Amino acid sequence: MPEPTADRRRAPGPRPEASALARALRTALRGEVDFGAAARALTTMDASNYRRVPVGVVAPYDADDVSAALAVCREHGVPVVPRGAGTSIAGQATGTGVVLDFTRHMRRVLAVDPEARTAVVQPGAVLDRLRSAARPHGLTFGPDPSTHSRCTLGGMIGNNACGAHSVAYGTTADNVTRLSVVRYGGERAVLGRGWTGGPAALPDLIASHLALLRTGYPPGLPRRISGYALDALLPENGTDLARAFCGSEGTLAVLTEAEVRLVPEPAARALAVLGYADETAAADAAAGLLPYRPLTLEGMGADLVRDPAARAALPPAGAWLFAETGGATEAEARAAAATLTRAADALRATVVTDPAARRALWAVREDAAGTATRTPDGAEAWPGWEDCAVPPARLGAYLRDFRALLASHGLRGTPYGHFGDGCVHVRIDFDLVTPTGIARFRTFSEALADLVVSHGGSLSGEHGDGLARAELLPRMYGPELTALFARVKQAWDPDGGLNPGVLTTPAPLDTDLRFTVLPSEKVPTAFSYPADNGDFATAVRRCVGVAKCRVEGPSTGSSVMCPSFRATGEERHSTRGRARLLHEMLAGELIPDGWRSPEVHDALDLCLSCKGCRSDCPVGVDMATYKAEFLHHHYAGRRRPRTHHTLGRLPEWLRLAAPLARPLNIAVSITPLASLVKRLAGLTPERALPRLAPRTFRHWYASRPRPSQGLPVLLYPDTFTNHLTPSVGQAAVTVLQSAGLRPLLPSAPVCCGLTYVSTGQLDRARRVMRRTLDTIEASSHPLVVLEPSCAATLRTDLPELLPDDPRAAELSSRVRTFAQTLEEYAPDWQPPRLDRPVTGQTHCHQHAVLGDAAETRLRARAGLTGTLAGGCCGLAGNFGFEPGHYEVSVACAEDQLLPALRSAIPGTPVLADGYSCRTQLEHLTGARARHLAEVLTEGLEAQAAQEESTG
């Protein structure tokens, strides 16, 4: 990493006046006040293109804290920015003053009234938490952005969020009845219908501009989010102050509590997936389907569906409409979908009612916000014009003009979104780094604003204006109405302390771009980052802030990301938080120490390197690799922790210890000796030391007859199988031979380098990997790897650490899991029928890198029923043995793995192909988990015994 310039070496600590502010806030508040570099770095960005550095972060404990914080900030003349999940894509959740983080304490659903169909929530309450509380009463909150698993009600109210079901339930503003707010300075108010709670000057301001408010807003727009909704204050609209407050983006007052409406949730749903030639054809069709009253009418082009499995689930087409219908029964919902389908004039269509299948299809649509950040050829694409809206009947015409405008500026983007509401999401391949690219961004933005207005549209149809579009509001509303916006802002916030630069007195849309602070030259790295043009900064800025890693625990399904966040609930322990800190490390302003940064090191310390983000993050952030890279540089020329020498070099120690396995096992069974060894090795005292196998797998293999028949496959004797659980290797040999294959072993010991990679010893890892390549010569034999973490290392880390060695890519391409080998090279083999349920866990590295489809099919063919848990076991190689990690390690196991075992029938076989997973299970539950190969071997032995007994 290049040495920071003098400008980039500014001290990360707060200014003297900020220190005084911090002291005053700590005196006045019960909640946390953090003006440290890490807290500030975590909140410099939201999910937009913008970056503003705050002076500090406050996590208020309650409404009293909010009031006190605002009073203190006004006294010190410091602006305030309220922040929810930080998923805003227009920059309004960033600021230069004090950031109020509501996700720490003010995050509860306070009440649900099923008779009144209302709920009371705090601003930091996550939408899915509200929906879970309402579901037992057959109710839900109608608006549902794709970030529903982590977005907060406060953020939804601030931005007037909508979501896929807005054609049925409207925007957030349509579902709010009462708001408790605090103005800059600390004064409290309650807003509903009528003028109560608003500024004294507001009624006269509205009364003197009735004609303007009745004519100044474009008609026929279900998604008009831009500017202030002052027309909600017209007498014919009920003078609804709470509704007018929605979408004000934290510029008028700060929300502390909200009463919201709930709607009945359909007992059954059906999803009609309608295929069209392209997105403009889908857009042309959408408005005509609104009379059939669908719950959703979402559009998406084929460019956004890049996963072959997801594409196979959709009817062949160039674009699709997702039209959801509801009913009292499945038959009723399906009938409504069928009626809509007949009217749709689609090229192809399918109707799905199975809940799991519907969820899988919706996941494709919800991940589009991440998928769209890369064009099909891998180029970066960015928000900024994410959600313009036009009248639904004009959507097709608008999209055709929009495509032409893109082409005229040499830009690319794939539109998708809420076609039933005329709202289009798109990420565009802007160059937001060079002066030429930024100039094009401005020119295009101005032209697109004019195009949207020419179609009678709104610059924002969902996420608000923020820093991205506020400058252009006069093009939509004209100077008179935008001047009124400024006067309304002045009435609410005469000191201008709430989120300045947003909506009124806007900052230029091409300032404060988050990419301009990154180094212009590539940072020297150990990994090659092939998907990011070899640039670590490009890899880090993959994180666009959609925050799928911030989903509250426990997780569901096969999701792995992000176990440490679910254990701690802290932003710095999320994938996004760590990416933000790395971004600031590269910028060098808040975090000037580069690779030596203690803030980044502390945040990465609880990263389990599970690789879940590599697959589950919609933009493919790979924090396990970034962590290894950071540790490699952080400890260069410095003393490493003891565990890096003990656990990080575990393969070396195990090879030395193998001849003394029996006496060493006896020694570590003596408690005082074991405690001494753990203390000297730097290991956590809660863990038992693993027992060494008296006879290694390689030794067992060398002592047995070698069959000469069968298709040869190369069985990889990984360190864990060879020295700790040779029974797994022995079982694999039995099964592979039963399938007609001939397992061979490399001529000498090999190591994938996993433990060196996970501890950031990358130079040593490369030496180990090269020795392995020297041992395993190129051949056509598949490489069967029984340990999922080793298979993942060979598949990804090996070629990315040795990009110039063609043998690395060749060996990587040959890596197969146990089940993949059987499926690909012995397709006619029939496994023994075991016909029993199983429980356990899919290894996180297998989920992230290799996939478990072949394992699932093999279990089904063997009659092993049940779904294995997702998540991470929490041991994660060296992680769970390191001091300070034990509680988080156990919490990760409690996310999915341990509940799955508790819910299983006693005596159910436990499957876990990973050594860490088996060790964690034995330590926490006493259960003996087994590799799939071991379970199949037992079946083969039982089958052989039965055949022998029956003659």
Image (cartoon, rainbow, N blue to C red):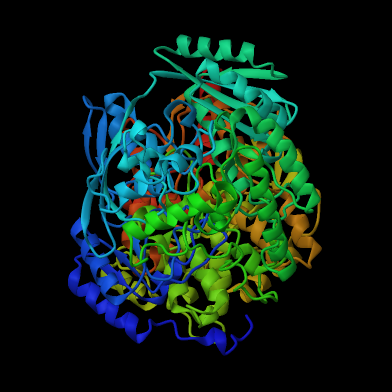
User: Which quadrant is the C terminus positioned in?
Assistant: top right
**Quarter-wise, where is residue 556 in the image?**
top left
Name the outermost residue toward the bottom.
Answer: 6
What residue sits 60% from the left and 63% below the top? 541
- State the image quarter where residue 16 is shown: bottom left
Q: Position of residue 221 (x, y in %)?
A: 53, 34
Q: Looking at the picture, how far across and down is residue 805, in whole percent?
A: 78, 66
Q: Compared with residue 329, is residue 246 higher up or lower down, i.e. above or below? A: below
The quarter in which the N terminus is drawn is: bottom right
From the viewer's perspective, is residue 813 above or below residue 367? Answer: below
186 and 622: which is toward the camera: 186
Provide residue 112's location: percent of width, then percent of height. 23, 34
Above or below for 854 versus 805: above
Foreground residue among 923 and 434: 434
- Residue 332 in sight from this viewpoint: yes
The quadrant where residue 316 appears? top right
Q: Is residue 260 above or below residue 948?
A: below
Which residue is at a point 81% across and 48% down the rendered structure image?
780
**Front position in the image: 885 or 93:** 93
In percent of width and height, residue 903 lies at 32, 34
Q: 496 or 527, which is in the foreground?
A: 496
